[in-house]
Image: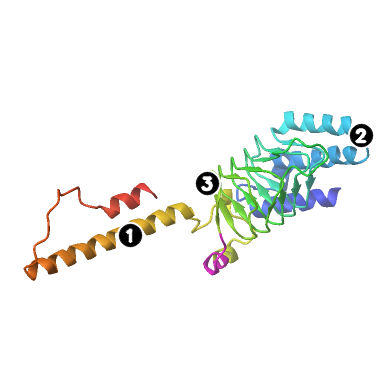
Amino acid sequence: MFSRLREDIASIMARDPAARSSWEVLTCYPGLHAIVLHRWSSACWRHGFKWMGRFISHMARGLTGIEIHPGATIGRRVFIDHGFGVVIGETADIGDDCTIYQGVTLGGTSLSKGTKRHPTLERGVIIGAGAKVLGSFTVGEGAKIGSNAVVVKEVPAGATAVGNPARIIEKTAATEREDATAKMFAAYGLTANGDDPLSKALHGLIDNASSQELQLVKILEALKAAGIACETVVELDKFNPEKLNKLVE
């Protein structure tokens, strides 16, 4: 038990720049307290003492603001940072070295008892503040869930999910290089180049429209120079790609 506790404290010290000492982590980090109390409640649950497991879980919720069902499976070195408002359901499965921020829900969408209803997080997943991961699917190893994202489908390993409903940013060679510099930790699930794919698509459409408008202007000028008259239409406001790009940032 004490070796696991030392391992948890060392993991938090490595990942949280605000952690100044092991004693501070041991006494002042509710995420650590919630994990330790979950081990007790989970042991009771597995050995058939269901009420006792739920009662310890209930007490832990009051002390830490973090609700973890005793039936949930949590791996090693899991870090719940700040943690207030975190809810982890009965059949959730959290792999080693995952990081979960405040306000996260690992919830179920099925009412069927005895079935897998909650998500599985593979090793090294980071879930940003306020994110909701709902359903019995898998979030792949090293994936990131952006703050306030609502995820209702599988996230591939190494990918990033952002938005509501969440859209998937697949891992590329560039993001692999970024991950090499931040292998263990990315605050709140943010990445250096984690643009929303919808935003990227809109920027592409705006740039394409701007290019086509410029081409049309050149065609009209060439026709006019050749003495070919073109029917005039009511002139509208000029297309402003810079303004539109700012609106979708």
Residue type marked 3: Gly
- Mark 3 Cα within 10 Å, few/some/many (few <14, many 20+)? some
Looking at the image, tell me whether mark 2 or mark 1 is earlier in sequence order.
2
Image-based side of 119 in relation to 143, left or right = right
Q: What's the distance in space between the residues labelled 3 and 2, CA to CA?
A: 40 Å
Give 67 or 138, whichever is nearer the viewer: 138
In the foreground, 178 or 51: 51
> Mark 3, mark 2: which one is toward the viewer?
3
Q: Main secondary structure of the magenta part?
A: helix
Q: Which residue is mark 2?
A: 49
Look at the image and give the residue range highlighted in magenta.
170-177
Cβ–Cβ below 8 Å for labels 3 and 2?
no
Q: Badge 1: how crowded within 10 Å, few (<14), some, or many (20+)?
A: some
- Quadrant position of residue 241: bottom left
Amino acid type assigned to the residue bearing label 1 in the image:
Asp
Considering only order in the chain, which callout, 2 or 3, is on the residue closer to the N terminus?
2
Q: Is residue 148 left or right of residue 87?
A: left
* In the displayed structure image, the side of residue 226 where residue 12 appears, left or right: right
- The residue wearing badge 1 is 207
State the SS at label 2: loop
Q: In the image shown, does 101 or 221 lie closer to the viewer?
A: 221
